[in-house]
Image (cartoon, rainbow, N blue to C red):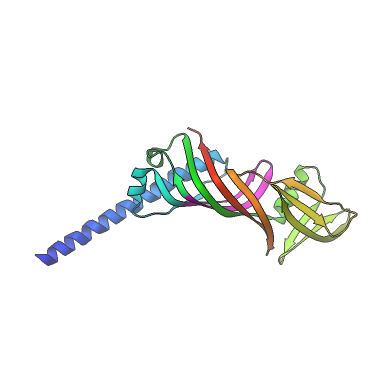
Amino acid sequence: MIRRFVISLAVLVALAAGADYGLRLYSESVVAGELRSALALSEKPSVSFGGWPFVTHLVSGQLPSASFSASTFTSHGVRLHEVKVSLDDVHFPRRRLLLGGGGVIRASDGHGTVAMTGADITSTLHHAGAPLTVRISNGRASVTAQGITVGLDLKVTGDALSLAPASTTLGSKSFALPPVIKGLRYAGVTVRGTEAVLTVSVHHPVFVVPG
């Protein structure tokens, strides 16, 4: 009798866990589709929710954490290679994760990275009318203009990326970095491998999702 009870209980737990997992995957897909519309992405981003069991968070309209990542898209004329953002204390209308639709998703804070390749920076500069070609390789950046190639220093100034060539003849350039989501601020930049990786902080982010 006890053995049957234990087996039955184990089956019920497994079914409940499976249903909870399936509901989480479905809700993540719904939000991914809405973020695609809200951020004008060419494809769905990857979305992940924290907290278990998920159904209790769904009912409360609050998640302890959530994260999303998206690759290769343009925001406000700036081409980005990859964006990764993790959010804490996420609030949402309870029916949204199941049914979708317009509304607002809010969070307390978060952090993440935004990556740009040399080609991304070059494309943005050309869009702004600056005939410069930027290359990033082996953790170093360089810029070519008028047949001259020199080293390049990158830094974040406010919400702009500043480019300082190692030659006064080329002159410094800068361009505004895109406010991918409301509440995002750029903190710094590091050149790694073939990318310029910008660190970001997020304070009270707001996602306005169209209906």
Camera-side residue of 145 and 152 = 152
Quadrant of the rendered image containing residue 140:
bottom right
Residue 113 vertical position relative to residue 182 in the rendered view, above or below: below
As rendered, which of 197 and 187 lies closer to the eye? 187
In the rendered image, residue 75 lying in the magenta stretch gets the answer yes
Q: Is residue 129 above or below residue 140?
A: above
Q: Range of the magenta residues?
A: 66-88
Picture quadrant of residue 199: bottom right
Query: Residue 66's spot in the image, x, y percent?
Result: 47, 51
Asked whether, in this view, residue 135 is left or right of residue 46, the answer is right
Task: For the N terminus, give its image quadrant.
Answer: bottom left
* Residue 168 falls left or right of residue 77: right
Is residue 135 something one can see in this rendering?
yes
Residue under the image location 63 percent in, 48 percent down: 185
Question: In percent of the image, x 57 and y 41: which residue is there?
Answer: 39
Residue 105 rendering spot, x and y as whole percentages: 48, 41
Q: Magenta region, mostly helix, strand or loop?
A: strand
* Percent of width and height locating residue 84: 56, 54
Above or below, comparing residue 84 to residue 129 in the picture = below
Which x, y percent locates residue 23?
A: 35, 48
Q: Identify which residue is drawn at 52% across, 40% down.
A: 207
Residue closest to the far right: 169
List the single residue furthest toward the top.
211
Q: Quadrant of residue 78?
A: top right
Image check: 166 left or right of 135? right
Drawn side of residue 66 relative to residue 164, left or right: left
Judge whether residue 181 can be spotted in this image: no
Name the outermost residue toward the left. 1
User: Per the image, is 92 magenta?
Assistant: no
